[in-house]
Amino acid sequence: MTDWDRFVFTFFNWKVMAEYLPKIVEGFILTVELALLIVVSGLALGLALAVIRSFGIRPLNWLIVFVVDLFRALPPLVIIVLIYFGLPSLGPAPSGFVSTWISLTLVLAAFAEEIVWGGILAVPKGQWEAARSTGLGFTATLTHVVLPQALRICIPPLTNRTIAITKGTALGSVVAVAEILSVASGAVAFSSNPSPLTLGAIAYLILFIPVVAFGRWVETRFAWKR
Amino acid sequence: MEEFLFTFFNIEVMRAASPILLQGLWMTLLLILAAVPLGLAGGVVLAVLSVFRHPMIRWPLIAWVDFFRAFPPLVLLVFIYAGLPFAGIEIGAFGCVAIGFFLNTSSYYGEILRAGIESIPRGQVEAARSTGLSATQTMGYVILPQAVRNVLPDLVSNTLEVVKLTSIASVVALPELLFQARQAQSVTYNPSPIVAAAIVYFLMLWPVVRLLSRLEHKAVARR
């Protein structure tokens, strides 16, 4: 066997790959489901927190700022491990899937809140005053005048952050979520050949290269004209 | 409430676990000291290369950066850690982590610095060149310092992400803070060591997060 043959046999072993392809596809679907759940719930929660914060209720805002800081400072894997291994000692034992979902939702919500809040602050004060003086109430001003402008500013950073956090679904492998990485590493141990990992890597690229390209496009599309 | 405190904030367990948590903290700091300068250096190289418009440089560079930005860092790390031994290369967990982090973080730093370089008006280059500075001197003394200043919040933010990312080294059994905390948890059957590790991370990174929100709000307000 030449070196090249050995390389192909090790990392691109078609026989091994074909055997584990169905499992990797299952992992792929689970990863997509998990990622979508995180994106929807994380962005919704983050937006809600930013809106609540704009009402300016002091003690509530301190709480929001603290929680946001907390989930921006803690590594996502630490949060996942804490929920998965910590909560069962109290009673409820969330599955790995739920632990990962909750953790990454909280992390994404924290970042989204911060970005949306920055966007709300960036809308000039005159917009508030003009809207209020035409007779719109506070809530109407916020939802019809300020938020649409704020969200436009937020789209590029929000897209990038969302992509970065959804890549964290791979962390679920640590708490036994059967997503791509955990299926692939399991298959490596089983077949003592790293080809399933190559397959897993390809699956991640199929999933995320379009997303990264989309992020690049969003960045130029919504870029501020200087 | 008492049960809650006993479970998550068990001072006795935390005290017993503190020596090995401290060892973990040292390893984490060592990782940061290796990953951040390596990533920054790689990022500067990628960003400077992006100045060349030639398609033979431009397209491979974009492909390289997007490839490593699309790859979840944990997948990259596991791939290196599990794959290299099959290729007959043994470099240990720390080496694997260093390589994985270098590939991942240098791409991110590179993108940020590229945006910074592109934000500097073309006239700066022309002015610098016309005073007799060479292309290298122009880049090093005129463009890069201004570029770094323009993207400082993003650089700090990415560094924060790198520091948080060091926790994934626990997956390849590198004894850093999270790994040690989990060891302690499995010995004591009590999650307090993980809570202690979370507190350490929080205390270490909270000032950075505060600084960042200030920088970001200021940057938005300036527009």
Image (cartoon, rainbow, N blue to C red):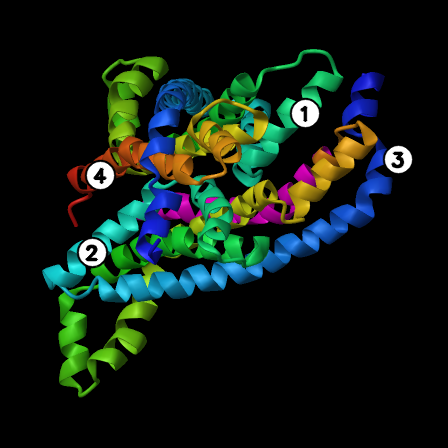
Q: Nearer the viewer, residue B88 or A117?
A: B88
Location of mark 4 (residue): A213
Assign a secondary structure to mark 3: helix
Query: Tags 3 and 2 in contact by the CB under 8 Å rule?
Result: no
Q: Position of residue A211 (x, y in %)?
A: 27, 33
Single out the mark in the foreground, 3 or 2: 2
Q: Callout 3: residue from which chain?
A: B
The amino acid type, in three-letter code, at marker 3 is Glu
Tell me the CA gap for discs 2 and 1: 43 Å
Q: Please name the residue that numbered disc 2 is placed on.
A: B60
The image shows residue A82, relative to residue B24, as above or below, that is above
* SS of the residue under disc 1: helix
User: Is residue B145 on the magenta stretch?
Assistant: no
Structural crowding at the residue carrying mark 3, measured as other residues with C-alpha within 10 Å and reported as few (<14), some (14–19) or many (≥20): few
Q: Please name the residue that numbered disc 1 is placed on.
A: A85
Amino acid residing under circle 1: Phe
Tell me which residue sits at (11%, 59%) in the image.
B55
Marks 2 and 1 on same chain: no
Task: Name the amino acid, label 2.
Answer: Pro
Q: In the image, which residues are magenta?
A: B195-223
Label 3 to label 2: alpha-carbon separation: 55 Å
Label 1–label 4 contact, CB within 8 A: no
Q: Residue B72's x, y, as percent? A: 41, 39
